[in-house]
Amino acid sequence: MSAKLVVGTQWGDEGKAKIIDYLSGEIDYIVRYQGGANAGHTVKVKDETYIFHLIPSGILYPDAICVIGNGVVLDPTAFESELDSLKERGIDAFHRVMLSETCHIVLPLHRTIDEAREAQAAGKKIGTTKRGIGVSYGDKVTRIGLRLGDLLETGYLKERLGHILEIKNAEITRIHGLEKIEFNELYESLLAFGDRVRPIVKNTSFELNRALGRGKSVLLEGAQGTGLDIDFGTYPYVTSSNTTTGGAIAGSGISFQYLKDVIGICKAYVTRVGEGPFPTEIHGEAGEHLRKLGHEFGATTGRPRRCGWFDTELIRHAARVNGLTGIALTKLDVLSGYDEIQIGVAYKRNGERLDAFPGMLENVEVEYESMPGWKQDISAARSLSDLPAPCRAYIERLQELSGVPISFVSVGPGRDDTIVV
Ligand code: GDP
Ligand code: IMO
Ligand code: MG
């Protein structure tokens, strides 16, 4: 059996969860492989809206098993509150969730440091979600992280946490001028969390490969997007994980040979939350207009998203880096009503066209092409032939420019508002 991967191709919030939910009906395992509670994944089913931060978006299907892979940074508080809010809505998710024994833990102190670093960075802040993501991944890489499996061994946890707090408390007090973290309270809460989740902590790489070998299907759920990838994004204005295909393999531990489909989720325009370069950004009132049309406010932090026109270089970059086999074009309905729609078709620097999305976006200018818009509401369309001609032409042009087949077109937030091409 094969695995499918869904990745963001822009700067996050492309509508990944809407497509993941659409695809999950026929999937046995849905897996988050990177990121943490910085993600905000919205699923709309009839009149109900769910926003997932850690639990994979497939959880609404009663037979789906949802996996938090080794590449995720798991915040116990965020995880428990997500389980609780699902329970309040009649979904008992606990026994359908599997947690990797080697995923790293986001400690409260990671959130504190994230917030302090942002506050102290003045004009240089990243605009993080303040969920402690970068600090937790930093500790993972510098080998002072705590893993979920560590919480299951009383003696080991005591020793390990003691060592970690010695280092982190020096940072907290000396650099950030904050109160030191007391050992006991943190130790007790981690121990209690470990005890609660013990039955669902697994070697998820082993479980997934075994399931695939037995003919089960797996859907890997990317968080964030290619522009936020630690290596391929607009560094330093990125998140702290590999959001792209390589990260999906490293963060889930499935054999790459199982991976057959990589679907890139791509908004019909572009948005970005937080700081960092955004070549096709629409400034001023026109940008605000698009934000209103698309209800572009962060699903995790509520921050207004910056809005811009479709960016060909960015999608071509995403196609290369991820090995996209198909694109799901989302939020096309939002563009209804424009007389003209702009498409960023190339990047230039000092008047010369660039070959590709560059490592640094400084001084990049965008060359635009304009296409006629359409006035009709397209949200009821269920096949390409239901769409007005200029809208079909826009889809065809985007496909041509990106060099990847557009396999899905989304015309609304609901499960059914989807055209399969
Ligand atoms: P994700 O992080 O990539 O899963 O995306 P978010 O959930 O953060 O943001 C996408 C937003 O757009 C959510 O509010 C979705 O309900 C909504 N959405 C997704 N697809 C469509 C679409 O085709 N049309 C419209 N109008 N809204 C959509
Ligand atoms: P989903 O999965 C959009 C952005 C933050 C900030 C940068 C670093 O819903 O698409 P971090 O907290 O990760 O250290 O912040 O990354 N960011 C996102 N932007 N969608 C997301 O997730 C994001 N997760 C992080 O705004 O610019
Ligand atoms: Mg989101």
Image (cartoon, rainbow, N blue to C red):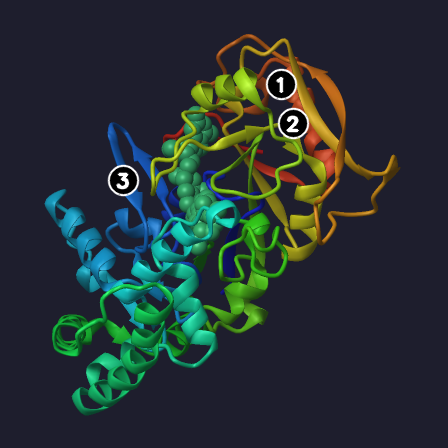
Residue located 51% across and 71% down the image: 250
Q: Position of residue 41 (x, y in %)?
A: 37, 44
- Residue labelled with disc 2: 395
> Measured along the vertical axis of the image, is residue 57 above or below residue 365?
below
Q: Position of residue 83 (x, y in %)?
A: 18, 54
- Three-letter amino acid code of the residue under disc 2: Ile
> Measured along the vertical axis of the image, is residue 173 above or below residue 16?
below
Residue located 20% across and 87% down the image: 158
Q: Quadrant of residue 230?
A: bottom right
Is the C-beta separation of discs 3 and 2 under 8 Å? Answer: no
- Residue labelled with disc 1: 391
Q: Is residue 369 left or right of residue 264?
A: right
SS for dot 2: helix
Residue closest to the eye, 150 or 413: 150
- Three-letter amino acid code of the residue under disc 3: Tyr
Q: Residues within 10 Å of mark 3 (few under 14, many from 20)?
A: some
* Ligand 3 visible in quadrant: top left
Q: Residues within 10 Å of mark 2 (few under 14, many from 20)?
A: some
Note whether ligand 1 is within 8 Å of mark 3: no
- Residue labelled with disc 3: 50
Give the CA separation, mark 3 to mark 1.
Answer: 30 Å
Q: Residues within 10 Å of mark 1 (few under 14, many from 20)?
A: many
Residue closest to the eye, 378 or 11: 11
Is the C-beta separation of discs 1 and 2 under 8 Å? Answer: yes
Residue located 35% across and 54% down the image: 115
Q: Quadrant of residue 258?
A: bottom right
Image depth: mark 3 or mark 1 in front: 3
Q: Earlier in the sequence, mark 3 or mark 2?
A: 3
